[in-house]
Image: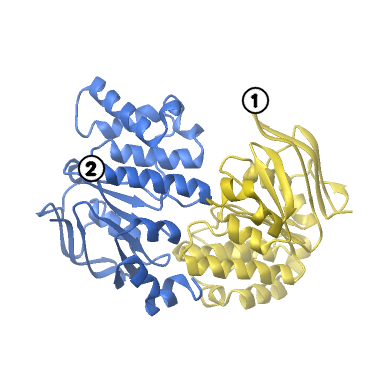
């Protein structure tokens, strides 16, 4: 089943076309990578999917139902959660409180939200830091917190926006392991990432955007050989 | 005498030690990398050198003279210029205005036209876009602007904090080859990077910081071959 369908979506800001007739899908259980140069429109696609922007044209369906015009919290309740490239925690709340906010997506009960949040913190490896304020966490821990907040909402599809940026290769390996464990729990993923080693290893399929248009789509090895992708994104000898 | 020397530098955030007894030397004309995990103290070190933070102990000397009590603008006048993580350009100002703000010291102002010519030669995109608001540039162009603005200050030592952050692979390559070109012009480069492999490959020497202390020093090639570095920072 196609979990997410984006059908010929265009987003214009005044005279600027940020996303131009892009179509892509994410199947249930799939990991799809979304790559492209800076300014290609990748994050705009995430904004469109999560209800921060409304498409100028085109359709977006999640589990067969249109999400166009739905509020971000409604889309989240339907099972589509996202993270932000620049992590957006509540800096003066603890890690636990931050994740509980995500858990309230599925429950009004404080004890249940706390239980869910503690489970998720344990899952992402932040249990020992649960009482630390978000602003006291190191960058790798803040990236984990960002993912924990999304997971606490119990998504069927999780959108990850550059969760590896600013991390060193060893820290990246740890995040790759975490993403595999999230996937093993039955969560589908759409991942924006510039770390090619990670995106190639994780993705079953990769979609490449350039100047707001889809210029390539395919299995990781095919995309890495594509001349247009090499010219626009990877550079020679990539 | 080395161009830059840190001797026994201790820096604290409140009660929390961020750098402990750090010794580091940078030789004139070299490219030197500082690598390490997030939170190891790399950015703190650059902020201490540029005068944004005061060490509680130890000394920072540039060309033989102490600079650790100088305000930032005096450090810039000496020729030590910092390109901060996240670029910190002025988004509502034009590209050219951002560049001109880099040349506010008396010596740099006198050479503004010549500096601008050099920056535009290095980054033709900035020439094309000089009248445009800097906030409308792409991430890679903003990084070029931040480096260009620093070059306008006529640095002898250029400190770069994660210049490849958030950039696509092709742009990462461009930024690293630009750094090499800047160094070939005789400017010493002190580079802080998470992109450990490329940073060490570019550098004559490297330092590894761990928990606020210098854990390893060596040539770039030695560190790339070091088992601990491979495991801890290269993900091998």
Residue at image position (46%, 65%) is B138
Percent of width and height locating residue B110: 76, 69
Q: In the rendered image, what is the letter of the chain coloured yellow?
A: B
What residue is pinned by disc 1? B15
The answer for which chain carries disc 2 is A
Taking depth in this image into account, of B117 and B66 the one nearest to the observer is B66
Colour chain A appears in: blue
Kindly report the distance in space between the C-alpha atoms of the residues bearing marks 2 and 1. 41 Å
Residue at image position (48%, 42%) is A140
What residue is pinned by disc 2? A155
Q: Nearer the viewer, mark 2 or mark 1?
A: 2
Q: Evaluate whether residue B196 shows in this view.
A: yes
Residue at image position (55%, 62%) is B143
Secondary structure under the numbered disc 1 in the rendered image: loop
Percent of width and height locating residue A176: 40, 49
Q: Evaluate whether residue A210 shows in this view.
A: no
Residue A145 sits above or below residue B92 on the image: above
Marks 2 and 1 belong to one chain: no
């Amino acid at each position: 089943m196609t979990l997410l369908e984006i059908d010929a979506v265009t987003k214009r800001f005044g005279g600027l076309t940020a996303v131009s007739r892009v179509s892509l899908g994410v199947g249930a259980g799939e990991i799809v990578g979304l790559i492209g140069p800076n300014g290609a429109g990748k994050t705009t696609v995430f904004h469109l999917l999560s209800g921060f922007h409304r498409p100028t044209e085109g359709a977006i369906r999640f589990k067969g139902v249109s999400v166009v015009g739905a509020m971000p919290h409604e889309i989240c309740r339907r099972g589509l959660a996202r993270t932000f490239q620049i992590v957006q925690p509540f800096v003066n709340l603890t890690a636990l409180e931050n994740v509980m906010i995500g858990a309230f997506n599925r429950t009004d009960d404080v004890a249940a939200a706390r239980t869910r949040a503690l489970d998720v913190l344990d899952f992402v490896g932040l249990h020992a830091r649960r009482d630390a304020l978000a602003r006291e966490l190191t960058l790798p821990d803040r990236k984990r917190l960002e993912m924990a907040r999304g997971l606490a909402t119990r998504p069927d599809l999780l959108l990850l926006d550059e969760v590896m940026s600013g991390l060193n290769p060893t820290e990246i390996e740890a995040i790759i392991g975490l993403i595999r464990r999230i996937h093993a729990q039955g969560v589908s993923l759409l991942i924006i990432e510039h770390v090619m080693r990670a995106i190639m290893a994780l993705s079953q399929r990769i979609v490449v955007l350039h100047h707001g248009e889809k210029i390539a789509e395919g299995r990781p090895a095919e995309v890495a050989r594509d001349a247009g992708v090499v010219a626009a994104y990877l550079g020679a000898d990539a | 005498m080395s161009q830059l020397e840190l001797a026994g530098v201790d820096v604290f955030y409140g009660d929390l030690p961020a750098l402990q007894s750090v010794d580091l030397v940078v030789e004139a004309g070299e490219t030197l990398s500082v690598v390490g995990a997030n939170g190891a103290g790399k950015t703190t070190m650059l902020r201490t050198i540029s005068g944004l933070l005061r060490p509680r102990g130890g000394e920072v000397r540039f060309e033989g003279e102490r600079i650790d009590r100088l305000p930032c603008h005096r450090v810039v006048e000496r020729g030590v210029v910092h390109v901060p993580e996240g670029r910190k350009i002025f988004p509502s100002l034009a590209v050219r205005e951002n560049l001109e703000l880099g040349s506010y010291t008396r010596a740099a102002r006198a050479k503004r036209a010549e500096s601008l010519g050099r920056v535009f030669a290095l980054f033709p995109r900035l020439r094309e876009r000089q009248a445009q608001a800097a906030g409308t540039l792409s991430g890679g162009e903003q990084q070029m602007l931040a480096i260009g603005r620093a070059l306008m200050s006529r640095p002898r030592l250029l400190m770069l904090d994660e210049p490849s952050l958030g950039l696509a692979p092709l742009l990462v390559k461009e930024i690293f080859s630009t750094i090499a070109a800047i160094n070939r012009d005789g400017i010493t480069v002190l580079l802080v990077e998470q992109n450990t492999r490329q940073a060490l490959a570019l550098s004559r020497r490297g330092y590894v910081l761990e928990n606020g202390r210098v854990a390893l020093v060596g040539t770039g090639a030695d560190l790339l071959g070091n088992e601990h570095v491979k495991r801890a920072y290269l993900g091998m």
